[in-house]
Image (spheres, rainbow, N blue to C red):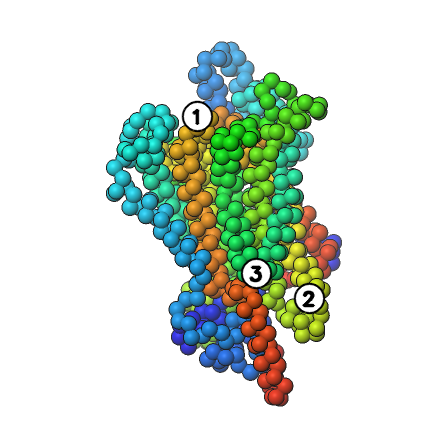
Amino acid sequence: MGLGRYIGKKALWYGGALLAAIVLNFILPRLVPGNPVDTIVSSLARGGSVTADQQQKIYASFVSQFGLDKPLWQQFLIYLNNIVHGNLGVSFSAYPVSVNHLVGQAVPWTLAIQLPSIIIGWIIGNALGAIAAFKGGRWDSGAFTSSLLLSAMPYYCLSIILLYFLALKAGLFPVGGAYSYGLSPGFNMQFITDALHYYWLPFLSLVLVIIGGQAVGMRSMAIYELGSDYVNFSRGLGIGQGKIVGYIFHNAMLPQITGLALSIGTMVGGALITELVFNYPGMGTLLFNAISSNDYPVIQSITLIITVAVLFANFAVEVVYGIVDPRIRAAKTGEK
Amino acid sequence: MTGIIPTDALEPRGNEELPHEVAGTDVGTQFTADGSPAAGSAPDSGPTAPKKRRRSGLNVSPRFWVAIVLVAFVMLLAFVGPFVYPYGPNAAAGGLYDPPSAHHWLGTDNFGHDVLGVLIAGSRNSLFNGLLAGVIATTIGVFIGILAGYVGGWLEEALMGITNVVLAIPALIVLILISVSVQNSNISFMKGIVGLALVIGITSWPWTARAVRAQASSVATREHIDIAKLSGARLPSIMALDVFPYLASYIVMAFVLQVASAILAEASLSMLGLGPQGTNSLGIQLHWALAFQAMGSGAWWAFFPPTIILTLVSFALLLLQSSLDEVFNPRLRRGKKKAVKAAAARRAAAARRLASQPVPERATS
């Protein structure tokens, strides 16, 4: 199969997945009896903070914005059109703030915490896993069991434990949030040093879990390679140990690099709960608040953004693999 | 041919795709041999290599027993706990965050309920949810996987197409969307723990299906399938009796992972505030502890117990899976230095044997 056809086929698959995701995103909240706007506006009215007149206005603006008075297929087209133009709508609970604005505020925090921890955790974890595989014995079982414990631990469980011991008991770090009360985000020395102080604990809790996961993966890959035929063959040929280790490492690395690419893709949605535990102002906290106030436009936008990021990362990995490794193109229906 | 030998050798090994020929060779050599590798087989191919054959029973590592003990501990807490510990999850037992005492071993939570009582009920529900969702996901995944892998052709294309599309969309996102809808609906059944297990089950089957498909299509090329076909067996019977048993050990491992991930999915959803309503679970317990500032007030007894149980469960299940993997998949077994020496000795012996014998007339089997 030629490269062009391969990429075209992949694009078709991922396009299909994207469409399915958008349809799900659109249809699921609408399956609920009654429309979401009714629920929201009536709950606003119960709060007593909105007059009947304002309520009418909010209601009318939502209905026209989402085209709720039109048939379902037209609503879907409106929805699609909005997405394509990068318009995520208006938040229910923070009316009239746009969802784009809310998401734009949350995403940098999430990226700032995730990107460094994924990359650093990946490097340390792989080194640890490779060493465990080569050394074997006591070192291996110790490193393996502790890595397994770390990787088996849900992200947020480690967060809770660290938060309690390091922040509450030892008082080394602040308990939650991302910067001190009274400061406003900006690029000045005072804010950055303050934010760094808050940054360490969530960072640590993410990086430890990533190290665990990567070490477990790398260890079993390397062990698998150690027992494979080409290693025995190389030994038979009398090739030096150092060179064999080089081959093993090279082959064991490939899946790990895929893993890195994929985890960068899942980054935005990777640690929703950890953010929640630390009350960190990223996507997780935004989603939590949106769920507790039934803020459909925000929920839908976050799920959409996460899905698009994941699909895009998957697609990119497959395309790169197809370019790098012709066997994958040649493979029959296989993994598709 | 009894005991461990067949299970050891017939096991499709490796987690990913298995080239058909490899599986084929293993069967071929294994049936002719009674412990020592048959002529023509690779001299040191892991599972057929003669080692420690005198040992009877399952060759499990200490990790396996650690995992079993941990799982048993949580099960005991969840299912025997209610009969031993006097306080239920819903009875008012004290004030806001009373510290642990002789009466209330783990103190009380933000509602004044006994934490250990809530923990017991929550563990039970979380385990129940995990098992139910695991059964649903594994059943769907195995069915679709075997159907696609065994039948092949356009059916395989179609089923795997669907699987890959579902797999590409993050499961947590679909779960969040469905749960948001369910919570605002008026179907009370779906809001409970059974409904949640159902939702988790029907969103998490794809990776099992994909993995089982790879294994099933390698089993489909084996000779006993031809015999079954020749003797007139129908498709369901071949799928159930001739393909399924060869995947059983793999499916057990997949099931263990499904249970673990379902328990964690429930916890994640519950912490986001999308958990089952009007009941207890480990995630819900954590949700309330976070919502009512248990951390800030230093009430460690409100959030530590569910955290620890969650960690224990997921650690124990992963450990169980990895130790089962070592049983079924001997290549992963370590004993590093000894094994390397033994392998070297085997290679040397095989080389001597090969040197003294003419190469058998056997093409690639």
Q: Is residue A310 left or right of residue A46?
A: right
Instruction: Decide if residue A149 is on the left or right side of residue A312.
Output: left
Q: Nearer the viewer, residue A136 or A247?
A: A136
Q: Amino acid at mark 3?
A: Gly
The kind of residue on which mark 2 rests is Gln
Q: Quadrant of residue B129?
A: top left
Residue at 33% x, 40% y is B120
**Amino acid type for the residue under numbered disc 1:** Ser
Quarter of the image for the C terminus of chain B: give it. Answer: bottom right
Coordinates of residue B311 in the picture (x, y in percent): 45, 44
On residue A241, the disc is: 2
Q: Chain of mark 1?
A: B
**Label of residue B297 in the image:** 1
**A242 horizontally vs A103: left or right:** right
Position in image of residue A20 (x %, y %): 57, 43
- Residue occupied by mark 3: A136
Whether residue B49 is situated above or below residue A221 in the rendered picture: below
Instruction: Judge the density around disc 3: few (<14), some (14-19), many (≥20) Cα neighbours within 10 Å.
Output: many
How far is the residue under mark 2 from the one under mark 1? 57 Å
Asked whether residue B76 is in view, the answer is: yes
Q: Tag 3, which chain? A: A
